[in-house]
Amino acid sequence: MDPKTCMHTGQLYLPGDESLQREQLKCLDRLHEFNQINPSNLERKTALLREMFAEIGEDCYIETPFHANWGGRHVHFGRNIYANFNLTLVDDTHIYVGDFCQIGPNVVLATAGHPICPELRERAYQYNAPVRIGRNCWLGANVVVVPGVTIGDNVVVGAGSVVTHDLPNNVVAVGNPCHILREVNDRDREYYFKDRRIDPAVL
């Protein structure tokens, strides 16, 4: 099977394949261009993201610098997504992020892995598994999501967490490895931070 097919089927392949490298470098050139755009040039930033990504909805904003192995080629963003500085998308296969997600600084969503077998690693073999983030999630600063993980809707992942397993809808999860701390509950609709009440007018 050709390497490009293996990229998206979870099979081992060699990412240094010449045809893959040529295609990837074109994507990285566009990513470099994106990172050089003045922050005030919102129109150009938006236009280039539409060229770079597999899909991207309305009202998405990514702070620079932004990093991606394939420059966003295999990334599917919904609408109204905000990503803070130093987002890293290891998009060797597909990454899906739902509407209204907020992504903190230095977050890594990684689809690529390498075999534990030393002989295979020495030969530079790789495999990929997609990452899926649901709707209206908040990933705190320095969160890492590893290959093959699915996160449900309305999930908050605490800063510094390493997400190694799937998370269901409507939970707060923290830690390394990340675990469910609790469910989103009625108190969260009354208080937004510690003992600070939500003004009913903003709901």
Image (cartoon, rainbow, N blue to C red):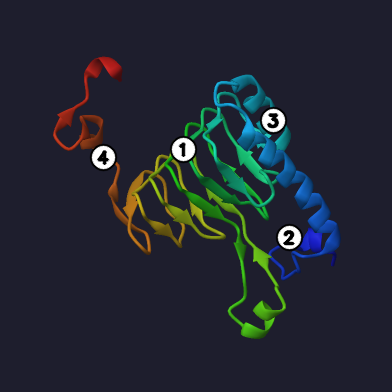
Which of the two discs, 4 and 2, labels the residue nearer the N terminus?
2
The crowd level at tag 4 (other Cα within 10 Å; few <14, some 14-19, many 20+) is few
Please provide percent x and percent y for residue 196.
16, 30
Q: Quadrant of the C terminus?
A: top left
Say whether marks 2 and 3 touch (CB < 8 Å). Answer: no
Please provide percent x and percent y for residue 61.
54, 30
Which of the two discs, 1 and 2, labels the residue nearer the N terminus?
2
Q: Residue 105 versus residue 91: which sits nearer the camera?
A: 105
Say whether marks 4 and 3 touch (CB < 8 Å). Answer: no
Please provide percent x and percent y for residue 44.
66, 23
* Residue of label 3: 48
* Residue of label 2: 7
Which of the two discs, 4 and 3, labels the residue nearer the N terminus?
3
Say whether marks 1 and 2 touch (CB < 8 Å). Answer: no
* Amino acid found under the numbered disc labelled 1: Asn
In whole angstroms, how far apart are the C-alphas of marks 4 and 1? 27 Å
In whole angstroms, how far apart are the C-alphas of marks 1 and 2? 28 Å
* Amino acid found under the numbered disc labelled 4: Asn
Residue at x 70% of width, y 73% of height: 124
Residue at x 36% of width, y 63% of height: 176
Q: Quadrant of the N terminus?
A: bottom right
